[in-house]
Image: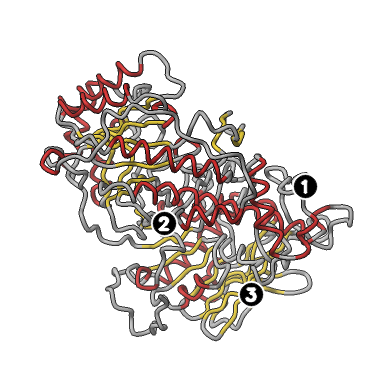
Amino acid sequence: MSLLVAVVLAWAVPCPAAVAPAAHRSSGEGRVRPHLRARFKPIASDSVVMLIGDMPWPGRGGWLTTLKERIRLAAACGVDTVVLVCDTRTVEGSFEALDALLRLAERHGIGVMPRLIVDSAAFTERVPVTWPFVEQLPAFANTAQLAGAVSLLETVIRHLEGFPNVVAYQVEWGHYGESWINAPFWDSPSSTAAFLAFLKPLHPAFQRFSPADVAAWPLGQVMLTGSCLPPSDPRADPATVAEFHWYHHWRDATTRTITWTLRAAARSLTRRPIAGFSYAVGGPDGVIGHVYSAGEYLDLAFSDWTPMPGTAHEDFIRDAGFSGLHLAEFDFDTPYFTRDRAAHAAAAMAARGILPVIFYPHWSTALTDADIPALAALIRAHPPLSSPPPADVLLVLGHQQVGILGPFEIGLLPEGGAAVTANEPPGVVALLLGNGTSLDVASPDAYTPTLGDRYRLVVVCSPTEDHDGAFAAKVAATSSPVLVAHPSFLLGTPTRERPVVVTSAYCETFNPVALGSHTVGVQVWGQNTSSEPAPRIRFQGALAALGTLEGYTPNRTVFSFYDGPFDEVLAVAEFAQANHPTVARMGHVTFFGLITNLRDPLQRAVCQQALLATVATLVPEQRRVASAPASCPRAPASP
């Protein structure tokens, strides 16, 4: 049993008996002699790759014929590799259809990367999802089903190893085959039981939770506690709010554990490359998916950020924590790409070292067969740089899960996700891109001071990390200037040492962030508009030209400010009773507590100017060299 499976088992309770994969025809099983495999081009930066569509489950008429036509088209257009999406339920009982496609591709000299979405018709426990559409996803917190999934995946890969033209495997599960569940709560008996098994040992206050009342908060509920709440409100109980917080910590960790368990199983069975989705940041409208560090068990990261709808430029963001080949879908069925911008986009992707994958599934309406030769020629004309230079800024994003429904709405991470990734009004990411700043991204897991020192500036938007202080230590050891943007460090508590010390499910009112020998207190204030007027923001120092901002009112009246022995305070929130820094610098780290995607256009303009002006004070005009400037002494590097 792998260590990762054991971790999931430790969180769960006894589950139904393991699911045995259905009988399979094994005509393709067996290893391939090296000289046969060498006939097919490996996926590399000079590849031309096209996604040809799905083997759907349950199967519907016509798809097999269309997929065969796509393979013939690929061969005629100079495409050397096709991506074939295969829900493993499709091959339970028989590999006949899959084998026919692989043999046809083999005869045409085409390599195949199966995108294996691991699921079984025998899995009876499923997670129901109703947003954005109804689907039933496998409940892999059910450890028996996860073990069955590993066994099924092993059966499929052993079979596929017999085909010389299988050049790589992509291993996924869940929503859209993207290795996540797009629901705030996993409504299944095993998920609830596994979470309770994780929660109860943390603190005696959690013993009272049961399957009837755990994780029952509605989507969009602001889990803020405080003196303004009546005692009858469940949010007045810190343990209840902490439970909500820990649920999403458990959910994120379990999602990653399931993913790594499946990919580790694939890695143990083959020497061929393993690909997987590694969404460094989620969608362009403020919807945040999952964030993985792509490195574990992966050779190919699929995919990175693609352009935001409505922008006149193509912004491609690499996962800086992953050194392997990056791929991204050239998807003209979404607003991300328009056919008239294809050449520009191909060149922009190549400059960032990203290999386009022509997205032409059998249900596509945006392309025709006649478009494929030109797109293939564009990709051949713009091979990705094997070692692209670092972008201007490294954006560090935490494992922000689903929950932001738009630029203003609040989901599981109130304020947080939209403040970072919303397109209109722009959050931090869109604002920097619109100002001509290039971005790479890394997760806190993959971040190191050495990585950060390659960039002119490190921008941290990482609300779910820092449970053990390790990430803050890495920030302190970074020599490049660091900008900690709202709502960073707001989810650092409760910790395992203080599991119920919390005043909000998404942020703490006082979360110390150790930087060397100093401590910064991050505060979050849920404004009670009935009794407390909105504060005035007074800018000073390098931001003094912005003057004062009257009546600062963030979306949903939640914002952050700071305490600490700062070297410089650039903006102060002035309340009736006290003043608090909201933009301040301690050494090489600057804390920025304002929100840039405010509803009010005048307030929004001032806050956006404040962010861009702060960035301008931190980033020199010339690209910095790898060594740190003399004015920024290097702290001891963390491992």
Q: In this view, does 368 lie above or below 386?
A: above
Name the amino acid, label 3. Gly
Q: Which mark is residue 521?
A: 3
**Does residue 284 appear to the left or right of 629 in the view shown?**
right
Residue labelled with disc 1 = 213
Viewer-nearest of discs 2 and 1: 1
Query: In terms of sequence position, does the residue under pointer 2 or pointer 1 come before the other?
Result: 1
User: Regarding mark 2 in the picture, which secondary structure is present there?
Assistant: loop
Mark 1 nearby-residue class (10 Å; few <14, some 14–19, many ≥20) = few
Residue labelled with disc 2 = 293
Query: In terms of sequence position, does the residue under pointer 1 or pointer 3 come before the other?
Result: 1
Across and down, in percent, residue 431 comes to 46, 53
Residue at screen point 53% across, 47% down = 425
Front residue of 364 and 421? 364
Viewer-nearest of discs 1 and 3: 1
Across and down, in percent, residue 173 comes to 46, 40
**Does residue 597 appear to the left or right of 226 in the view shown?**
left
User: Regarding mark 3 in the picture, which secondary structure is present there?
Assistant: strand
Residue at screen point 31% across, 39% down = 158
Whether residues under marks 3 and 2 lie with C-beta atoms below 8 angstroms apart, the answer is: no
Q: Is residue 501 above or below residue 128?
A: below
Query: In terms of sequence position, does the residue under pointer 3 or pointer 2 come before the other?
Result: 2
Whether residues under marks 1 and 3 lie with C-beta atoms below 8 angstroms apart, the answer is: no
Across and down, in percent, residue 179 comes to 47, 43
